[in-house]
Image (cartoon, grey):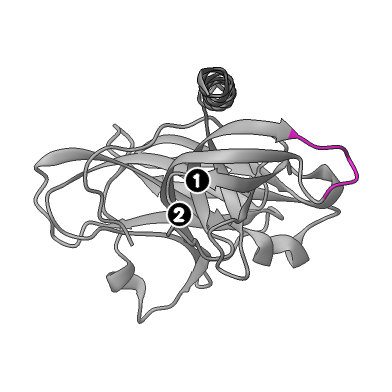
Amino acid sequence: MIMKKILMGILVLTFLVACNNDDNERYSQPNFTTIATVENPNLSSGFYFKLDNNDKMWVTLTSFPYYRPKNGQRIIAVYSILSTVDNSSLYNHKVQLNDVYEVLTKGIFKITAATQDSIGNDQIEIRDMWVGSNYLNVEFVYPGYNKIHYINLVSDSTKTYTDGKVHLEFRHNANNDYATYSKWGVVSFDLSSLQPLAVGDSVNLVIQTHEFTTTQNETYYLTYKFGNAASSNIREMMIPKGEIKLQ
């Protein structure tokens, strides 16, 4: 009887050590914090997200079991890689989702005379602007307090250009908020609708902004590449802290 208890204790200890080793190995994996696009047409808790280099991640473990993001949602995902699969699979890595932040995700707004005032053009500080996959991504800082701020990328049909480029405007409506605190924000604009305007597989973009600078009106020149020429850069980002009200 004593020998059976000893053997049972050894088996249980071996099992616990193996489980602990698995857990230690799982949680000792390095974290990556990357912007990505959700692929989740069935609104499942076990979903895919695709990095801007087209690597597809399958969320097999998650700290948010009730999180079911919508298809096409841009996120900043904090994840650790559990395993890598071969090239024949539908995905590249199995991952554990440790934290997530939903990035404001919008299309291009076609402005009209009636919406010119409501869309706003308040000043803002652009920290970074880049094209990743099919998205124009903008990281910015704005002064605010407790109101929702509206962020848009607009196409103004009342303005004409002859340089063969697509001219767009990054617009900010502060909604008459108090400029009390400096707040951080990020937004992704889907550029897919511009593909019919492309020469080949790229579109040259001219983005105008209204900023807190000496000239106030700044211009950014970027290229949106798609198809085989698509941008393949992976952007590491931070998870923002504090309450952010953007729409």
* Tags 1 and 2 touching, CB below 8 Å: yes
Which label number is shown at residue 62? 1
- Is residue 85 located in the magenta-colored stretch of the structure? yes
Relative to 230, 58 lies left or right = left
Q: Residue furthest right?
A: 88
Q: Residue at x 11, y 45 (%)?
A: 179
Q: Nearer the viewer, residue 62 or 119?
A: 62
Residue 169 coordinates in the image, percent (x, y)? 46, 56
Q: Which residue is mark 2?
A: 65
Dominant secondary structure (helix, strand or loop) of the stretch shown in magenta: loop
Q: Residue at x 67, y 62 (%)?
A: 192
Range shown magenta: 84-89
- Is residue 167 located in the magenta-colored stretch of the structure? no
Give the amino acid at mark 2.
Pro
The image quadrant of residue 41 is: bottom right
Crowdedness near tag 1: few (<14), some (14–19) or many (≥20) residues, C-alpha within 10 Å: some
Is residue 234 in view from this perspective? no
Residue 154 coordinates in the image, percent (x, y)? 47, 63
Which label number is shown at residue 5? none
Residue 93 coordinates in the image, percent (x, y)? 71, 38
